Image (cartoon, helix red, strand yellow):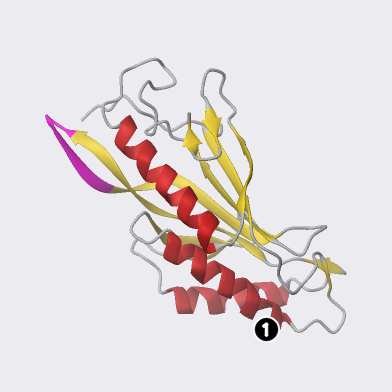
């Protein structure tokens, strides 16, 4: 079935959420670094963020560094196993002098789609991407939620009416607010690469 919304090469929307202050300051000196201690704090924040996204975003792939797959599955990942594999990837990367923990997470997003004359819920791949890492030059973590899809807009980038836009915009708004609460932080930056698309701290304006 044809839908008015589409996937694009560029970012339709991006939100950067900075956490509250943590124990570590990034980047870290890797000499004698207790990577497992760093991982405990990172995964504490990560677990809180994933609980905030529960019901909205399900991880099926982890990349570290970006573009290099640590683990992937057609079904939701076992996050315990995924975190262990990510930790092993970090340990292999400590030949550099300065380092910060992080990864890119891809998966399925729960969005509303229209099937014939009905609006239904569907878990679609590639609708959002999440990057979570230590923020260089600070003692905070940063979560970047980005989308290259205009399923959230009442009017698509091409100008077509999108009946599911309002419902999905509200889902995104709720997810961003929950992430701010979970990370004890706030949306510090938001942007789009498309003219005419309005973004603000709570989603698409």
Which residue carries the number 1 mark?
36
Q: Say left or right for 202 vs 32.
A: left
Which residue corresponds to the image point at 34% horizontal and 17% vertical from the top-left?
Answer: 160
Main SS type for the magenta part?
A: strand
Q: In x, y percent, where is residue 72?
A: 45, 64
Q: Say left or right for 120 vs 79.
A: left
Which residue corresponds to the image point at 32% horizontal and 32% vertical from the top-left?
Answer: 166
Q: Say left or right for 142 vs 62.
A: right
Task: Write down the region rendered in magenta.
Answer: 115-122
Is residue 104 positioned above or below 192 on the image?
below
Judge by depth and name the residue closer to the eye, 27 or 198: 198
Judge by depth and name the residue closer to the eye, 59 or 38: 38
Is residue 143 positioned above or below 148 on the image?
below
Residue 72 seen in render: no
- Count of labels shown? 1
* Displayed quadrant of residue 42: bottom right
Q: Residues within 10 Å of mark 1 (few under 14, many from 20)?
A: few
Is residue 29 positioned above or below 118 on the image?
below
Q: Is residue 104 highlighted in magenta?
A: no
Is residue 27 positioned above or below 128 on the image?
below
Judge by depth and name the residue closer to the eye, 19 or 191: 19
Q: In x, y percent, where is residue 191?
A: 61, 33
Q: In x, y percent, where is residue 59?
A: 43, 61
Q: Secondary structure at mark 1?
A: helix
């Amino acid at each position: 079935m044809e839908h008015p919304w589409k996937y694009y090469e560029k970012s339709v929307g991006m939100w950067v959420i900075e956490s509250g202050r943590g124990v570590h300051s990034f980047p870290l000196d890797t000499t004698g670094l207790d990577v497992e201690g760093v991982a405990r704090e990172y995964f504490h924040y990560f677990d809180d963020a994933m609980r905030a996204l529960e019901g909205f975003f399900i991880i099926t792939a982890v990349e570290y560094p970006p573009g290099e797959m640590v683990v992937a599955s057609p079904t939701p990942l076992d996050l315990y196993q995924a975190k262990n594999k990510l930790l092993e990837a970090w340990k292999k990367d400590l030949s550099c002098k300065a380092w910060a923990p992080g990864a890119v997470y891809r998966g399925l997003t729960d969005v509303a789609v229209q099937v014939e004359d009905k609006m239904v819920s569907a878990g679609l791949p590639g609708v959002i991407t999440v990057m979570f890492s230590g923020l260089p030059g600070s003692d905070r973590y940063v979560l970047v939620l980005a989308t290259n899809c205009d399923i959230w807009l009442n009017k698509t980038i091409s100008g077509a009416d999108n009946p599911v836009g309002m419902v999905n915009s509200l889902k995104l708004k709720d997810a961003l607010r929950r992430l701010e609460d979970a990370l004890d932080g706030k949306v510090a930056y938001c942007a789009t690469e498309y003219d005419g698309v309005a973004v603000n701290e709570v989603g698409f304006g």
